[in-house]
Image (cartoon, rainbow, N blue to C red):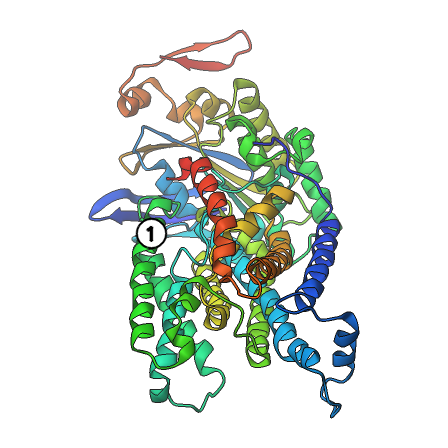
Amino acid sequence: MIATQNLTYEVNGKVLIEDISTVFNVNEINLIIGANGAGKSTLINLLCNQINPTKGSVIYEGLKTQLPSELSKVRAVLSQHIDMAFPLTVHEIVLMGRYPHFSHQPTEKDHQIVKEAMDLFQINAFSNRNYQTLSGGEKQRVHFARVMAQIWPDGKEQTKYLLLDEPLTYLDVYYQFDFMNKIKAIMQLQPMVVIGVLHDLNLASQYANQVLLLENGKVFQSGVPEKVLTKETISKVFDLEPTFFTDSNGKRHLSF
Amino acid sequence: MNLSINQLNKATIYSTLSVLLLIVAVLSVKWGALEISSKEIFHALANWNSSVQLSLNERIFLEIRLPRAVLTIFTGAALALGGVMMQGLFLNPIVEPGLIGTSSGAAFGAALYFTLGAFIPTFIEGWSLPIAACIGGAFATFLVYFLAQNKSKKHTSTLSILLIGIAVNALFLSGVGFLSYIARDPQARSITFWNLGTLSGANWHSVIIVAVSTISCGWIGLYFSKQLNALLLGETEASNLGVNVKQLKIKLLVVNVILIAVATAFTGVIAFVGLVVPHLLRILKGSDNRYLIIGSALMGALLLSLADLLARLLLAPAELPIGIVTTIVGAPIFIYLLRKNEYLF
């Protein structure tokens, strides 16, 4: 479980995150939504200790130490977009996910996990490709495999943490759903806290256990999708009125 | 750009480089203004430190050619290792020790030592020259590093590194020029020595110091190769993989300064080795830093030995400053890289 207490972040007197106290539970997908500039990425950066809060704190419950070297064994973070100045093979990049787990040379187990992670995201075919030559969506899948290799199920009871900053940006529709389904599948294998920033409200309402709707650095509303994603909240926060309809399978959709 | 990365076997690359290095090293002790026969080489080696009277050729081999060949090997390795680590640190394939002030700062420190050496306490005798070079190199490198930082961009901007580097290099090289002008020591007086580099001053004392620094810094570099790889993803991702980025940067800068400054103190500024070697290695087998560090030590030693052989043979019995040879090869590659990587500006 990750908990924040009165989390506040200011830069040059401008308040980007204001007094957020919330809980992200184990075995739940927590999705953060909000308009541009609402503070979604800042919140993710605070949660993964990239920046230090002005006030308040982030607590990883059940971890003895929050040293970066220890945290990196149980927590993986995926940033928005990663460019590389040098040629590296896809395999080498996925192997980086195992770096926190071995000291100098990868073990047999590390290689096995890298292979399974690459299989999972269907990137085995370009294991030896130069990362720089991949398309945006292919690069994204390489990094999925990398962060998953970092927190790959190891049969232990230790909770794993996955933080995602707009993970689906470069993916086509097929892989957007594919990715969300794979996260759910991996969550069946070990205790996990998943926190992600998402723009697609339909995906959020379909996959989230908890939605955190941000406005101007504050939590406007949080809870299950049905409670948070309503006509009133969405028109207030996004300044655009949605229509809801239910399809023949009983699934709720919204459109603008 | 090739879609795939060559999957040459590392062992093949290392052993090929080692064999070539051995061949070039043997040639470079044999050939020169006069040729030394294999028989003389073996006789001299067998009677090293014994009281047997050696011939002139044998003494030239033991006291001039051999230390020079060994110094060349360690200097080439140091420059190439410095290139790999600096490029990894700046996340930029055009950075090399000569560009970011390390070499010129070290040359300035060393020239200052030669000129004002009498005023420096001698309790660390034998090591004061490399220490003076390290101080100069560190000063210039940190100056470029901090002035080129751009808070708004994640990459250190190539343009700002180049421009600040030009200014800092010009400053320190003109400092060297001034010191050469007022110096009495013949070595310090030779401005070509500092600006274009030469290995002609090699002796066993300099070989030992450069060897100790290169081997230990190279080993430390190998130790950091995993963190350097993680840094390729950018500082944020590296820290998410558990790397303490701030500490790593400071450590790497210090290791680099020692590596480059110590070599530069004895050889002057030799440009472009640190640029060309990592580039060639990346063409062979990508950018895994563990491979780059081992490979660059071998290939740097090989290329500098080759360049030194050329420098001695092209105008024999006269000798070209080695920096001219490395620049003729390196400058076009540098221009090519700059043009190819326009997107990094």
Give above or below for B108 relative to B170. below
Q: In the image, what residue occupies the spot 29% across and 19% down?
A: A235
Q: In the image, what residue occupies the spot 47% across and 41% down?
A: B337
- What SS does tag 1 mark? loop
Res B210 quadrant in image: bottom right
Give above or below for B4 relative to B109. above
Residue A186 in sight from this viewpoint = yes
Q: Looking at the picture, how far across and down is residue A135, in whole percent? A: 53, 26
Give above or below for A182 relative to A77. above
Count of number-bearing discs: 1
Give above or below for B11 relative to B120. above
Residue B287 in sight from this viewpoint = no
Q: Using residue A250 as the reference point, say whether residue A219 is left or right of it.
A: left
Q: Nearer the viewer, residue B39 or A108?
A: B39
Image quarter where the N terminus of chain B lies is top right
Residue at label 1? Answer: A53
Query: Can you name the residue that lies furthest to the top here?
Result: A248
Query: Can you name the residue that lies furthest to the left here?
Result: A13
Q: Looking at the picture, how far across and down is residue B130, in whole percent? A: 46, 76
Q: Looking at the picture, how far across and down is residue B145, in whole percent? A: 36, 57
Q: Using residue A32 as the reference point, say whether residue B9 is left or right of it.
A: right
Q: Looking at the picture, how far across and down is residue B188, in whole percent? A: 39, 76
Parent chain of label 1 = A
Q: Nearer the viewer, residue B331 or A161?
A: B331
Q: In the image, what residue occupies the spot 41% across and 79% down?
A: B186
Image quarter where the C terminus of chain B lies is top left
Q: Which of A132 and A154 is in front in this view?
A: A132
Mark 1 belongs to which amino acid? Pro
